[in-house]
Image: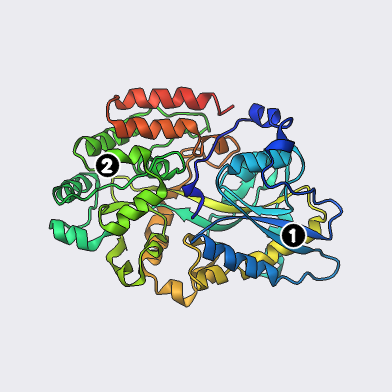
Amino acid sequence: MNESNARRSGMNRRAFLASTAAAATAMTVGQKAAFGAEEIKFWDMVWGTGATYTAAAKELVGSYQPSGDNLGVRYQSIPWANWYQTFTSAAASRTTPAVSSGAAFLPFYFIEQGVIAPADDVVAGFDKSGTNDFLPGVLDAMKTDKGYAAMPWSMDLRVIWVRKSLLEKAGVEAPTDWQSFIKVGEALKKIDVVGLGLADGSTTTDGQHSVSALMINNGGGLFATDGTLDCVTDRNIETLDFLNELVRKGIIDPYAASYTSDNVTRDWLSGRVGMGFGQTGLDKNFPADQRSDLTVISPIKSTRGDKGTVYYINPLMMFKTTASQPSSEAFLTWYLDNMKVFWEKGVAIDVPVRKSIAELPNLKQNANLQKSIAEWQPVGKTIGAQAPRPFGALNAVDGGGAGAAFIQQIIEGKTASKQILETLQTALEKVVK
């Protein structure tokens, strides 16, 4: 399980402040403030392969031995369900942990609210020790006017997967552009296979990720270069027209509007889905003897000839409620230096962001991952596209109610593309302040 498996409930600044009064009762994890503790708390979301990831992370943190006066660390797994309320309520009641993983844009929101400490000293420590081997661009993506909002630890990169056996059965080759994607989808439809697997039920943001990837694929996005909302553009209209054609031709399953991530995963496993966007570790959902049937194809060209996809940089952030900022920084540095075990054990399904991890032997032998890093990562952008850098308001856009309604309108196929985008623009204007 990962963040895409949870509906992200957006909240603007006003709602965040209003949540203060209800924080004590809404706080689901019910922990005491860290002040005065003999150890600091580390919250970790349920990433990767779910329970096996969490077990590996707990074991890793349990092996941490603080040096000098630094405090020890207590691990706590946090579910994705209601994650936004969990974090905002904790922030409002000052019961946040010392260090935490979390959703991609949460640090940008929290640093604007003054809730988290910039990671500048951690970055400086890596520079000083000569161990700064973060892949190009990922540290820069965490920069804000107030410093580094967080440290990156992995990248949720969306790529197109196909089941080779199903394409062979349909008598087609993998698509290279939008036109051939439609042709392949039509061929799969004839053998009762879905050509674009999507899930837009109440507990997932998978559908939003796929549509965002296609909008960026066509050089579009939700924002203009100055960071203002800009949903109703020619490029976005073209993307929705493409999706509408997939709906009309039965290439997108009408049941996708109510599908969960588990539903679409089961359809991949059963052979009902033959193509679709997914994380770089999608094949890990398959039995070992079937994984070779899954392959990542090269980025496809849109009608305009553009390539692109969406990615989310998974962060590790430090909250100001820590009992010891030096202890938070010492643990965060150690954790980043030792987390390669997640990829060695195969419990992480996202792209590593450090060169020393990306070059692990088992990852170098993973052809799908290497293709993702070489071909998809360079054309990826965040959902903030076309804005130059992430900002706090993206947290309210990322998987909020407006995005869910947007995808459902697309899947229903009853509304004109421009009208769908106008509705989305109006809805997002209410949450992006």
Q: Name the spot of residue 264 as percent of width and height, x first.
A: 35, 50
Q: Amino acid at mark 2?
A: Asp
Q: Residue at left 31%, top 55%?
A: 268
Circle 1 is placed at which residue position? 329
Q: Above or below — where is 17 with respect to 312? A: above
Which residue corresponds to the image point at 27% horizontal and 66% vertical from the top-left? 293
Spatial CA distance of label 1 from label 2 is: 47 Å
Name the one closer to the observer, 27 or 180. Answer: 27
User: Which residue is label 2 attached to?
Assistant: 253
| Count of numbered marks | 2
Mark 1 secondary-structure assignment? helix
> Quarter of the image holding residue 354?
bottom right
Left or right of 171, for residue 274: right
- Residue 140, labelled with which disc? none
Q: Left or right: 35 with respect to 120? A: right
What residue do we see at 32% from left, 72% from top? Answer: 289
The quarter of the picture where residue 412 lies is top left
Q: Can you give x and y, in whole percent of width and height, for residue 338 in the image?
A: 63, 70
